[in-house]
Image (tube, rainbow, N blue to C red):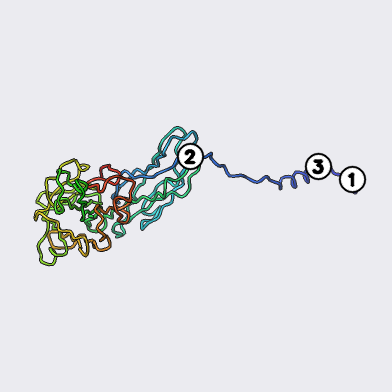
């Protein structure tokens, strides 16, 4: 009827217009526990065929609330195509860490070695312990195996103050004897280093190796080989393979020298120019972080040591 209020229409009118008004949705913010997150892998490299690695987020102290870690994946390998993993890790209240798996995805594309870099994007309920970026390689099985040998630490100028320079641990300081290089097998396969040759610039020019790696030298995946100039290397050195120069001197000059490693067919496997590091440091240069980072003087790390042959910067084994 015209002019008469329709009760049902009024209800609908109120319902429709009332439903258009909504309160702002506030994001859930976990209380900050004051704990910091670091990332780690249980391996350095995985095979494309069924390879997996454990990625762990660890707190500096136990939190009374959940800590949520958002992860950022970059690198040559493609997320979802070359590998799969979780984008978020939650460390439950009362726990110090939590882990997830990173799985390689098999394909038939010739890609070679592809790296993955994992960083902390955001932490809810805590913070990031410095800048966390860790690396892992996927080894392609569609191309011939590549020897992935890297130089992780080098001491060409041992300290001559007391026994500060006694890197080989034999209780005697000698310039030639305490020099060393630390090589890492950065792969999932053993490397037979028998007959490999180590040169400094002078030795390379004359064709005379400073060190001829003995027959039967098998370097296990992700393990270290340390070669000292001489002396009687004494200690555990993190379980690394230990050798001393067959010539009695690695002869690594403090300036203008180049380290070269060749295989049995005289192919250059590794070369490193010492020149950028030439400042008479009286200590080693080491990658920071191990394996991936740039070379820095050992004292730039929070440590009282001037070198760490056979171990990571923090003293743990490879």
Q: CA distance from mark 2 to mark 3?
A: 56 Å
The mark found on residue 4 in the picture is: 1
Instruction: Say which residue label 2 marks.
Output: 34
Task: Tell me which numbered mark, 2 or 1, is placed earlier along the sequence.
Answer: 1
- Residue at the bottom extreme, as displayed: 205
Circle 3 — which element?
helix
The quarter of the image holding the C terminus is top left
Q: Are marks 2 and 3 in contact (CB under 8 Å)?
A: no
Q: Are marks 2 and 1 in contact (CB under 8 Å)?
A: no
Residue ID at (29%, 46%): 313
Residue ID at (13%, 62%): 265
Circle 2 — which element?
loop
Q: CA distance from mark 1 to mark 3?
A: 12 Å
How many numbered discs sit on the rendered protein?
3
Q: Nearer the viewer, residue 309 or 145?
A: 309
Dot 1: few (<14), some (14–19), or many (≥20) neighbours within 10 Å? few
Instruction: Say which residue label 3 marks.
Output: 8
Q: In the image, residue 20 lies at what x, y percent? A: 71, 48
Of the two numbered discs 2 and 1 in the rendering, the one whose residue sits closer to the viewer: 2
Q: In the image, residue 51 lies at what x, y percent? A: 30, 47
Task: Tell me which numbered mark, 2 or 3, is placed earlier along the sequence.
Answer: 3
């Amino acid at each position: 009827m015209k002019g008469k209020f329709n009760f049902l229409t009024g209800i609908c009118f109120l319902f429709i217009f009332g439903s258009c008004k909504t309160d702002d949705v506030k994001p859930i913010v976990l209380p900050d526990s004051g704990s910091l997150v670091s990332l780690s892998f249980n391996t350095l490299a995985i095979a494309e065929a069924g390879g997996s690695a454990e990625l762990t987020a660890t707190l500096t102290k136990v939190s009374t609330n959940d800590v949520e870690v958002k992860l950022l994946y970059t690198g040559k390998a493609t997320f979802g195509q070359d590998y799969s993993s979780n984008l978020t890790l939650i460390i439950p209240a009362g726990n110090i860490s939590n882990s997830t798996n990173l799985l390689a995805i098999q394909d038939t594309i010739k890609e070679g070695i592809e790296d993955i870099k994992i960083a902390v994007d955001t932490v809810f309920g805590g913070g990031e312990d410095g800048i966390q970026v860790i690396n892992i390689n996927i080894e392609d099985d569609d191309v011939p195996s590549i020897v992935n040998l890297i130089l992780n630490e080098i001491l060409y100028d041992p300290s001559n103050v007391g026994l500060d320079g006694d890197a080989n641990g034999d209780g005697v300081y000698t310039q030639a004897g305490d020099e060393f290089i630390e090589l890492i097998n950065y792969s999932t396969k053993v490397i037979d280093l028998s007959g490999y040759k180590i040169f400094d610039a002078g030795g390379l020019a004359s064709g005379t190796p400073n060190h001829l790696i003995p027959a039967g030298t098998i370097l296990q995946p992700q393990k270290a080989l340390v070669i000292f100039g001489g002396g009687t290397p004494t200690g555990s050195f993190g379980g690394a393979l230990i050798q001393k120069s067959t010539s009695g001197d690695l002869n690594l000059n403090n300036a203008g020298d180049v380290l070269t490693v060749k295989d049995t067919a005289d192919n250059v496997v590794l070369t490193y120019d010492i020149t950028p590091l030439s400042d008479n440091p009286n200590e080693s240069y080491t990658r920071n972080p191990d394996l991936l980072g740039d070379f820095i003087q050992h004292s730039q790390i929070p440590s009282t040591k001037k070198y760490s042959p056979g171990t990571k910067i923090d003293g743990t084994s490879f």
